[in-house]
Amino acid sequence: MATPDLLFNLRNLFHLGAYQAAINNSDVPGLDADAAAERDTIVFRSYIALGSYQLVISEIDSSAATSLQAVKLLAVYLTGDKEGAISSLKEWLSDSAIGSNPVLRLIAGVIYMHEQDYNEALKHTHTGGTLDLHALNVQIFIKMHRSDYAEKQLKIMQQIDEDHTLTQLANAWLDIAVGGSKIREAYLIFQDFAEKYPMTGMVLNGKAVCCMHMGSFEEAETLLLEALNKDAKDPETLANLIVCNLHLGKPSSRFLSQLKLSHPDHVLVKNATSSEANFERALQAVA
């Protein structure tokens, strides 16, 4: 007889972007040592998603399990100590005792994705082994514009657990990347999440992106403003609002200013800054 998955709800909350709810509902009784370590990993990854990097760094000490040390490394990286974090990461990955730890490999994939070094990310994630790793592979292959490889990863996930939230999310990401008639299928996946679980900014953004692909910019704007009410600094919400408002012919400078202030490294900010610099140079050339 199968034992109940005591962390099912907690994992779901995390994967759907309900980070504060995951933290608030993390007191799960009856966990063995492995499950307790996984619970702590989810909680600290939730704090990272909320931007509480220093809390994670101060709470996880050097005697903690490898999985928690890996999560702490991500927090260190995101505070700006990129060189130090990557140096430690390389050292740990080459250690035969811990180098194959799935959470360490996952964090390596996340950090190298931030670095836009997708080949290096795949060195550590491609063997999979967990749904989290396969889902990250789907994201990496989409970034590399290789939806064919992303689809192979999704098929592995479907064989492991077709109904798992991560499998459904990966399916939606791939549908959006492929586009065309697949956009409607992605929309229905996010709609299903919206009906089953508490509405999160991630789900609202997913639906909004689908709406924009389908040309329904008014509906997208409504969804994105609802997401903004949940988190006024969320970079994806702000970026999507900028794009949406441009299509609606509405001013988007306020959202771009917010994005520049809270997330100066966002790809949209970098592109806008680069375009502004090019425009200035062009003006100088004609002046």
Image (cartoon, rainbow, N blue to C red):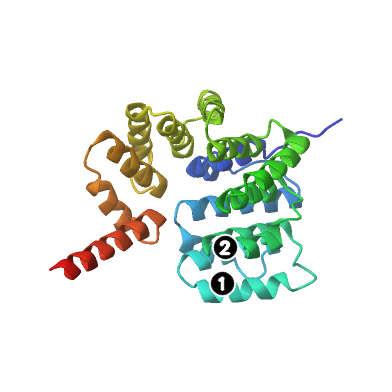
- The residue under the point 51% across, 25% down is 191
Closer to the camera in the image, 257 or 35: 257
Give the structural element (helix, strand or loop) at label 1. helix
Mark 1 is surrounded, within 10 Å at the Cα level, by few (under 14), some (14 to 19) or many (20 or more) other residues, namely many
Residue 153, image x, y percentages: 71, 44
Is residue 65 visible in the rendered structure shown here?
A: no
Closer to the camera in the image, 259 or 216: 216
In the picture, residue 178 is in which quadrant? top right
> Residue 111 got which mark?
2
Dot 1 or dot 2: first in sequence order is 1
Tags 1 and 2 touching, CB below 8 Å: yes
Height in image: 61 above or below 263? below
Residue 274, image x, y percentages: 32, 63
- The residue under the point 33% across, 38% down is 244
Circle count: 2
Closer to the camera in the image, 247 or 254: 247
Q: Which residue is mark 1?
A: 85
Residue 257, image x, y percentages: 26, 53
Residue 263, image x, y percentages: 37, 57
Asked if residue 49 lies left or right of residue 224, the reply is right
Which residue ends up furthest to the top in the rendered image? 195
Give the structural element (helix, strand or loop) at label 2. helix
Residue type highlighted by circle 2: Ile
